[in-house]
C-alpha cells in the first residue's frame, strides 16, 4: 500500500502538554461526561494557555475553576450540583476565586444556572470556547458573563489540544461536532447543536503531531462518526467520507493504533469495515449502541433501524473482521417498554455476543422528544430490575468472550502499571480488552506479545510471550544437560565395569 500524499504542514504547534508556570493565573479544570468532553477540556486549556493562564492540579492554588459538564442523565447533572457545593467552600475561603460552568449543562440551563447557583461567574457552551479570553476579562473585572451560542461551523480545527492524559500513550482526536439524529431520549442535539465535520487535513496534522510526541493510540471522536463528511468547496469528487478519513489517519504511522467512537447502526457502512480489515493498525473493535432489542422500542426511540437490520450489521462485522470485538449501549425501561420488549433486548444481547456494554436506566431529559410526547411510565423499581438482568447477562457474555481468548497471543499496547500491583503492567488488545501481565523488560507505551492464561469477566490475565519462549528454551536446555549428565554417568559406569572385568 502506497502512502497517500498528505500535506502534513503543522498548524499552531506549541507544547502539547500542560506548561505549569507559577507566574501566571492558575486554572483548575474538572471534567464530567463523555470522551468528547475530555477532549473539549484539552481545547479549553489550549485557549487558556495562550491567554496567560496555566494549569494547576490543586484547587487551593486556583484563580479560576472550570467544571466541564454533562447532561445526558439526571445523575450526571446531580454530580455537578454536588461539586458546586464543594467549590462554594473554596470560594468562601478565597473570595477572588472565579467559578465557570462549561459544556452541556451550561448549554442546557443557560442563565437558569446563574440564577440557581450564585457562586457561578461564567457560563460557556460547547461551541463558544473561543470567546473564553474575552468573557474572562469581564469576569475578572467583577461581572458575570455567559456565551451559549451554538454554531453551524465551529470545529476548533486549528486549535491543538493541550493533552491532560497521564501516560502520553492514548489521545482523543475530535473529527466532528454536534449531532443530526433525533433520538427521542437524547439531550445531545440540544446541547451540542447540528452536526459538522472537521477538515480532514487538520485531523491528519493533529495525528502526525501526536506521533511526533510519542503517542501510540488515537481515538477519533464524534457523536456519529459514520456520517462524517467533509465537503470539498468546489469538487464533490474530492469529498472525504469516514472510511476515507480512517484510511488517511491509519496511513500516518503504522505504529499508531487507530480507534473510533461512536458508530450508529443505521450508518455503519461496509466500506468502513473493509478499511478496518485492510489496516493492521486500525483496531478490531466497534462500539455499536443498540439501545434496545425491540423494533417497537427502536421506532419509539427514533433510532431509524430495526432489530433485523442491527443483527445484519453484526453478521457483516463478523464476516469481514472475524476477530472484531463488538460493544454496545443499552437503555433499560424506556417509555412504554414491556416485559416482552425487555426480553427482546436480552435475546439481542445474547445473539450479538457483546464483549462489553454500557448499561443505563432511562432518565427523562427536559425538552427532548420523549419528554414532550411520551410518558416516562416504567416504574423505577422495574427499570432497576431490568437493568440488573441486563448487567447480569452482560457479565456472563463478557466472561464467555474472555474465556475464548485463553491460550491466544495478543499484541498489547502498555498503558501503565496495573492498579493492583507495581510488578504488573496493564495494557489493551486491539479488541480493547484490558490485559494484566508481569512487567518483564517493557515500558509504558511499548507493544508486547502477551499469551492469555486466565481471565475474569473484566480482565484478561497473561504473560509475555517472549519471556515464555525464553523460559521454555531454558527448560529444554536444562533437560538436555540433565540427560547428557545421566548418559555420561552411565557410559563412565559401563567403562568402569568393563575395566574391572578385565
Ligand atoms: N437516559 C438514559 N441513557 C441515555 N443515553 C442517552 N440518553 C439517555 C437517557 N436520557 C445513553 C445512550 C447513549 C449513551 C451515550 O447514553 O445509551 O448511547
Ligand atoms: Fe457528552 Fe452527551 Fe454528556 Fe454532552 S450530554 S457531555 S455530549 S455524553
Image: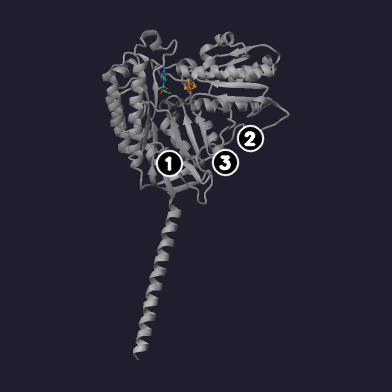
Q: Is residue 38 above or below residue 100?
A: below
Q: Earlier in the sequence, mark 1 or mark 3?
A: 3
Asked if the residue at tag 2 contacts the one at tag 1, i.e. Cβ–Cβ closer than 8 Å, the answer is no
Assign the N terminus to one quadrant of the image: top left
Which residue is painted at 39% across and 66% down in the image?
479
Residue 335 at x, y percent in the picture: 34, 14
Earlier-in-chain disc, 1 versus 2: 2
Tell which residue pokes out farthest to the right in this image: 23
Q: Quadrant of the C terminus?
A: bottom left
Identified at 42% across, 56% down, the residue is: 469
State the residue position of label 1: 429
Where on the picture, by quarter, is residue 31? top right
* Residue named by callout 3: 212
**Spatial separation of the CA atoms under disc 1 and disc 2:** 29 Å
Rendered position, 42 above or below 3? above
Place residue 488 in its image quadrant. Answer: bottom left
- Mark 2, residue position: 15
The colouring scheme, among rainbow, by chain, secondary structure or one colour, is one colour
| Dot 2: element | loop
The answer for how far apart the CA atoms under marks 1 and 3 are is 23 Å
Place of residue 499 in the rendered image (x, y in percent of width and height, measured from the top left):
37, 88
Q: Residues within 10 Å of mark 1 (few under 14, many from 20)?
A: many
In screen coordinates, is 132 left or right of 429? right
> x%, y% of residue 324?
36, 38
Label 3 Cα crowd, 10 Å radius (few <14 / some 14-19 / many 20+): few
- The quarter of the image that holds ligand 1 is top left
Image coords of residue 375 (percent x, y) = 35, 9
| Disc 2 packing (10 Å; few <14; some 14–19; many ≥20) | some
Give the tally of numbered discs: 3
Amino acid at each position: 500500500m502506497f502512502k497517500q500524499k498528505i500535506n502534513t504542514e503543522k498548524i499552531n504547534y506549541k507544547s502539547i502538554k500542560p506548561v505549569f508556570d507559577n507566574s501566571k493565573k492558575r486554572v483548575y479544570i474538572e471534567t464530567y461526561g463523555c470522551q468528547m468532553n475530555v477532549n473539549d477540556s484539552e481545547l479549553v486549556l489550549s485557549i487558556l494557555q495562550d491567554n496567560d493562564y496555566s494549569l494547576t492540579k490543586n484547587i487551593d492554588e486556583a484563580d479560576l475553576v472550570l467544571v466541564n459538564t454533562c447532561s445526558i442523565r439526571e445523575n450526571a447533572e446531580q454530580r455537578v450540583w454536588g461539586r458546586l457545593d464543594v467549590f462554594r467552600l473554596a470560594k468562601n475561603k478565597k473570595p477572588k476565586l472565579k467559578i465557570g460552568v462549561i459544556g452541556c449543562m451550561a448549554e442546557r440551563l443557560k442563565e437558569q444556572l446563574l440564577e440557581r447557583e450564585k457562586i457561578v461567574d461564567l457560563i460557556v457552551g460547547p461551541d463558544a470556547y473561543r470567546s473564553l479570553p474575552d468573557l474572562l476579562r469581564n469576569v475578572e473585572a467583577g461581572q458575570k458573563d455567559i456565551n451559549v451560542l451554538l454554531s453551524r461551523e465551529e470545529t476548533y480545527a486549528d486549535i491543538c489540544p493541550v493533552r491532560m492524559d497521564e501516560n502520553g500513550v492514548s489521545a482523543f482526536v475530535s473529527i466532528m461536532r454536534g449531532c443530526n439524529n433525533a433520538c427521542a431520549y437524547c439531550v445531545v442535539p440540544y446541547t451540542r447543536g447540528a452536526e459538522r465535520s472537521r477538515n480532514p487535513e487538520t485531523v491528519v496534522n493533529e495525528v502526525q503531531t501526536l506521533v511526533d510526541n510519542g503517542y501510540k493510540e488515537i481515538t477519533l471522536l464524534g457523536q456519529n462518526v459514520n456520517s462524517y463528511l467533509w465537503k470539498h468547496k468546489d469538487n464533490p469528487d474530492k469529498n472525504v467520507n469516514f472510511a476515507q478519513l480512517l484510511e488517511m489517519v491509519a496511513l500516518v504511522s503504522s505504529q499508531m493504533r487507530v480507534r473510533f467512537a461512536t458508530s450508529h447502526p443505521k450508518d455503519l457502512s461496509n466500506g468502513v469495515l473493509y478499511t478496518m480489515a485492510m489496516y493492521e493498525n486500525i483496531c478490531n473493535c466497534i462500539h455499536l449502541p443498540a439501545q434496545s432489542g425491540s423494533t417497537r422500542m427502536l421506532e419509539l426511540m427514533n433510532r431509524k433501524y430495526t432489530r433485523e437490520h442491527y443483527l445484519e450489521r453484526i453478521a457483516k462485522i463478523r464476516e469481514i473482521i472475524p476477530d472484531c470485538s463488538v460493544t454496545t449501549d443499552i437503555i433499560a425501561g424506556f417509555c412504554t417498554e414491556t416485559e416482552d420488549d425487555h426480553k427482546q433486548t436480552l435475546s439481542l444481547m445474547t445473539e450479538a455476543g457483546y464483549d462489553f456494554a454500557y448499561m443505563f436506566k432511562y432518565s427523562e431529559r427536559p425538552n427532548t422528544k420523549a419528554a414532550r410526547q411520551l410518558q416516562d411510565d416504567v416504574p423505577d423499581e422495574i427499570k432497576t430490575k431490568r437493568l440488573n438482568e441486563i448487567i447480569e447477562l452482560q457479565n456472563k457474555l463478557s466472561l464467555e468472550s474472555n474465556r475464548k481468548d485463553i491460550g491466544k497471543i495478543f499484541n498489547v499496547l502498555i498503558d501503565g502499571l496495573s492498579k493492583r500491583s507495581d510488578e504488573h503492567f496493564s495494557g489493551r488488545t486491539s479488541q480493547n480488552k484490558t490485559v494484566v501481565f508481569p512487567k518483564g523488560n517493557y515500558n509504558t507505551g511499548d507493544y508486547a506479545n502477551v499469551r492469555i492464561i486466565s481471565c475474569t469477566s473484566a480482565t484478561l490475565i497473561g504473560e509475555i510471550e517472549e519471556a515464555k519462549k525464553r523460559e521454555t528454551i531454558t527448560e529444554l536446555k536444562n533437560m538436555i544437560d540433565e540427560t547428557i549428565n545421566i548418559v555420561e554417568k552411565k557410559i563412565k559406569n559401563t567403562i568402569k565395569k568393563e575395566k574391572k572385568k578385565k
